[in-house]
Image (cartoon, rainbow, N blue to C red):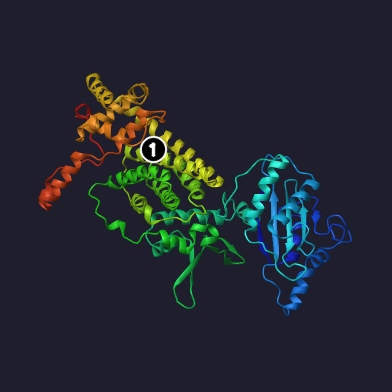
């Protein structure tokens, strides 16, 4: 059951909508199911003599009194509106049941507390099977305004209780950090234009993707404008400095004027102040990149380190990492090639909900992950298996984030993190299966594989049977052979990557070890670059170019390519 609280200033305008045919003739049998005074409330849906104006005057009675006291100044935003909708698949409630829902919601939100004879006037209108609209004028009989702080959260909490008592589908509770949902008018407009998403939703996703890649608020505005989005900064009258901003989607107009959405109205963490808190100022594009694979290595290391943060007990630090991880997902989808990119984009979009909570983030603590994420946005090198290793690391962070949210009762965020995990899992399977199959086909000779098995038994005796039984073991032997060619000691490497995190919970331990090893840098290539740097410009031009991949081919593979 979903309540959606908003405010407005036109009582008669809202009544016209509630009792009218709807924007697409979807309203059927509009009528009042509950009110502050059912006996004395005109119902245009049931009484032919009742008019919209009569109902508006009855609702506005206390507002008119208050207006006269204020010398003709009507209280601003005095119309309170809360549609309440059952979830898809729920049974249809009866009129008496909807009446109880309405009475409980207005009591819980402070509009009309139970037993308060001087409460605000309100009505509940039903014009469809699956929802009602609660409407109130927020001036009490004594002229005071009701205490409706956190009314949306209180309405949600009451609806969770109603779901249990009425046997309805139980939805996830929120914490007031969810973005605003598109209005019915916005959805209808998108449908008329043949769009799958509203302008509000499109702008939100564009803003998140741009914020993930840029390093300053000025660059944020510049990139948004390059996408055809109109940007309107808000300037403080006293300081002359930017204090906020609004965005308008290309072609989204009303009466010939752009439809503007404030950053905080798109999502709480897209407000100007929140963006300034976490955007980096250093110019990462100027950092020398001798090896095109370096951004990928740094990103994989940062993601791998992030997994332990959610067990640290420092919620502010963990929240900072959640936000930085959201940026990493957007840039991973941007930098990765292949058909699995669609799943990565879906994961980034889903995690936008998981990156927000009521816990204030320590963004400075997550600087390493955020820097690595932004470097990834400018990566031009296709790292092959290294990109899959990065997706594999992101999988574990998403699962850890879901567990962290679940432990703290963040139901919506936990569900969003799980959704992101499922998309990452699907993307990983699409990308990894052909690569693992190719690695298995290139497996080294039996004597080499036997040597690696002995190394495995020496350093990971508790896991050796499960690793050898894993279908990915032949692929792992190829990766070990390549790592050996790249300058690594296989036994020492297995010991190192096996000790990073426990393997007991891994369903495919050989696969886990494979991607951990794949993410190791090429030591021979690193040494060649260091030597080239020492030798000077002339030597560098004459030296052979080091491979861009994290590890070289094995000698056997090189022989096959000659």
62 left or right of 559 in image: right
The picture places residue 296, in percent across and down from the top left corner, at 32, 45
The residue under the point 31% across, 56% down is: 284
89 left or right of 455 in image: right
400 left or right of 63 in image: left
The residue under the point 70% across, 59% down is: 110
Q: Quadrant of residue 176?
A: bottom right
Q: Which residue is mark 1?
A: 392
Q: Quadrant of residue 218?
A: bottom left
Between 394 and 529, the one lying in front of the other is 394
Q: As displayed, is residue 105 above or below residue 451?
A: below
The residue under the point 41% across, 58% down is: 278
The picture places residue 283, in percent across and down from the top left corner, at 31, 60
Helix, strand or loop under label 1: helix
Between 218 and 90, the one lying in front of the other is 90
The picture places residue 104, in percent across and down from the top left corner, at 73, 52
Q: Quadrant of residue 279?
A: bottom left
Between 495 and 52, the one lying in front of the other is 495
Residue 20 visible in the shown view = no
Q: As displayed, is residue 355 above or below residue 469?
A: below
Q: As displayed, is residue 23 above or below residue 507?
A: below
Disc 1 crowd rating (10 Å Cα; few below 14, some 14-19, many 20+) is many
Image quarter (top left, top right, bottom left or bottom right) of the C terminus: top left
Residue 10 visible in the shown view = yes
The picture places residue 179, in percent across and down from the top left corner, at 56, 55
């Amino acid at each position: 059951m979903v309540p959606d609280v908003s405010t407005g200033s036109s009582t008669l305008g809202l009544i016209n909508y509630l009792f009218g045919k709807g924007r697409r003739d979807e309203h059927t049998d509009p009528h009042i199911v509950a009110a502050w005074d059912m006996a004395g409330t005109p119902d245009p849906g049931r009484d032919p003599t009742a008019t919209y104006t009569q109902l508006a005057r009855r609702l506005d009675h206390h507002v008119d009194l208050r207006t006269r006291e204020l010398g003709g100044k009507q209280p601003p935003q005095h119309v309170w509106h809360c549609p309440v909708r059952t979830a898809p698949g729920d049974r249809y409630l009866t009129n008496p049941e909807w009446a109880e829902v309405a009475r409980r919601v207005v009591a819980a939100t402070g509009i009309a507390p139970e037993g308060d004879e001087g409460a605000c006037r309100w009505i509940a209108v039903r014009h469809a099977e699956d929802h009602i609209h609660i409407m109130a004028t927020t001036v009490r009989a004594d002229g005071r305004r009701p205490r409706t702080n956190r009314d949306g959260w209180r309405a949600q909490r009451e609806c969770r209780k109603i779901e249990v008592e009425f046997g309805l589908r139980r939805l996830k509770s929120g914490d007031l950090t969810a973005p605003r949902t598109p209005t019915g008018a916005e959805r209808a407009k998108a449908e008329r234009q043949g769009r799958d998403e509203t302008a509000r939703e499109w702008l939100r996703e564009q803003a998140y993707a741009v914020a993930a890649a840029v390093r300053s608020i000025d660059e944020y505005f510049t990139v948004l404008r390059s996408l055809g989005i109109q940007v309107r900064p808000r300037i403080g009258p006293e300081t002359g400095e930017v204090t906020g901003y609004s965005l308008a989607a290309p072609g989204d107009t009303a009466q010939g004027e752009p439809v503007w959405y404030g950053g905080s109205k798109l999502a709480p963490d897209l407000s100007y102040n929140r963006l300034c808190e976490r955007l980096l100022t250093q110019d990462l594009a100027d950092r020398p990149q001798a090896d095109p694979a370096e951004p990928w290595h740094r990103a994989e290391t940062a993601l791998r380190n992030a997994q332990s943060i959610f067990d640290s007990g420092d919620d502010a630090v963990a929240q900072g990492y959640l936000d930085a991880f959201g940026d990493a997902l957007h840039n991973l989808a941007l930098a990765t090639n292949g058909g699995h990119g669609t799943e990565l984009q879906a994961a980034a979009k889903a995690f936008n909900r998981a990156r927000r909570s009521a816990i204030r983030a320590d963004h400075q603590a997550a600087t390493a992950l955020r820097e690595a994420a932004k470097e990834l946005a400018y990566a031009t090198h296709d790292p092959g298996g290294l990109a899959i290793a990065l997706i594999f690391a992101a999988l574990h962070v998403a699962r850890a984030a879901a567990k962290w949210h679940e432990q703290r009762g963040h139901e919506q965020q936990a569900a969003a993190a799980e959704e992101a995990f499922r998309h990452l899992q699907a993307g990983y399977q699409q990308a990894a299966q052909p690569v693992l199959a190719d690695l298995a086909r290139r497996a080294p000779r039996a004597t080499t594989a036997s040597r690696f098995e002995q190394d495995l038994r020496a350093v990971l005796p508790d896991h050796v049977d499960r690793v050898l039984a894993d279908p990915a073991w032949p692929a792992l032997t190829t990766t070990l052979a390549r790592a050996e060619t790249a300058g690594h000691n296989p036994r020492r490497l297995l010991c190192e990557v096996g000790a990073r995190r426990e393997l007991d919970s891994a369903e495919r331990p050989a696969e886990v070890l494979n991607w951990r090893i794949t993410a190791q840098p090429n030591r021979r290539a690193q040494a060649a670059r260091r030597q080239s740097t020492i030798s000077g410009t002339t030597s560098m031009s004459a030296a052979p170019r080091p491979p861009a991949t994290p590890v070289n081919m094995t000698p056997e593979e090189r022989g096959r390519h000659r």
